[in-house]
Image (spheres, helix red, strand yellow):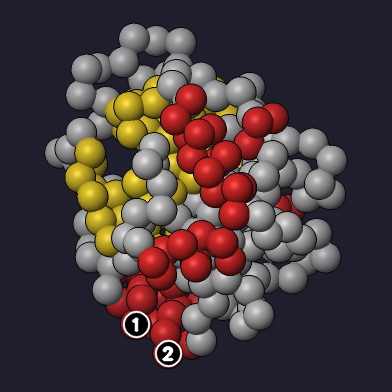
Amino acid sequence: MRLFGKTLKFPAAQAEQQPRHVEETRVTVISDTHLRDEELRLAEGDLLIHCGDLLDLDRSEPSDLRKLDRWFGRQPFDMIVCTGGNHDHLLEHARARVPQPFRNARYLEDEALNYRGLRIYGAPWVPGLPAHAFHEDRPGLANAWARIPAGIDILVTHTPPHGILDRSSRGMSFGCPDLARELVRIAPRVHCFGHVHASAGQARVGKTLFINACSVESKGAGMQRPISFNLPPRS
């Protein structure tokens, strides 16, 4: 895996500068772009994942969803999947009207898809923010996470699990304890999320690679480089 200019190892995957096996999928993960997607420069790949907060609470223009869809359509990927985040009221309202709000990306809400031998599951729910989009209370969160099947290759949520890449710049934990408990059962190979900008990065815990893919930096000035890796199908 290449992370912010460094090459990191992923089990059974090739480093970026080496030829990859045909069955491997080149994955790029972004999150929390907050209408600044045009500032990203994404290298060509197979699968682009957006973990939510595509929009911004301070702005609510219906045209923003259309612009975002056009941006998705220009990206050099075979498949684009996304879920929602707490800033995405427009997306939440659009999702209530139609199952798929985008033409150029597949929106995932409590559902899975198969792509190139990989099982991908997405869910947008967030705790502790009742005035925001995609909020769920504790019982709702517990039910949502319990529906995620075990053996997922890539889990896509907006919220982090409690205790993993979930610390704010003031050291407060904003991850979901219910999600953390269910991860023992789900055991995804990769768990991608965002939400907490100050903890952008990656960590391996057990057999799961956790990626906080927040794109806008914690103080809002610059943009983090997207995280990309090669992932083979589950053996």
* Position of 69 relative to 93 (above/below): above
- Label 1: state its secondary structure: helix
Q: Residues within 10 Å of mark 1 (few under 14, many from 20)?
A: few
Q: Residue at x 54, y 77 (%)?
A: 135
Q: Is residue 75 left or right of residue 21?
A: right
Identify residue type, mark 2: Pro
Identify residue type, mark 1: Asn
* Position of 80 relative to 56 (above/below): above
Q: Residues within 10 Å of mark 2 (few under 14, many from 20)?
A: few
Q: Position of residue 229 (x, y in %)?
A: 43, 30
Task: Identify the residue position indicated by label 2 in the image.
Answer: 139
- Kindly indicate the quadrant of the structure image that contains residue 213: top right
Q: Residue at x 23, y 63 (%)?
A: 150
Of residues 112 and 229, the one nearer the viewer is: 112
* Position of 25 relative to 43 (above/below): below
Of residues 82 and 197, the one nearer the viewer is: 82
Q: Position of residue 114 (x, y in %)?
A: 20, 45
* Position of 20 relative to 175 (above/below): above
Q: Which mark is residue 143?
A: 1
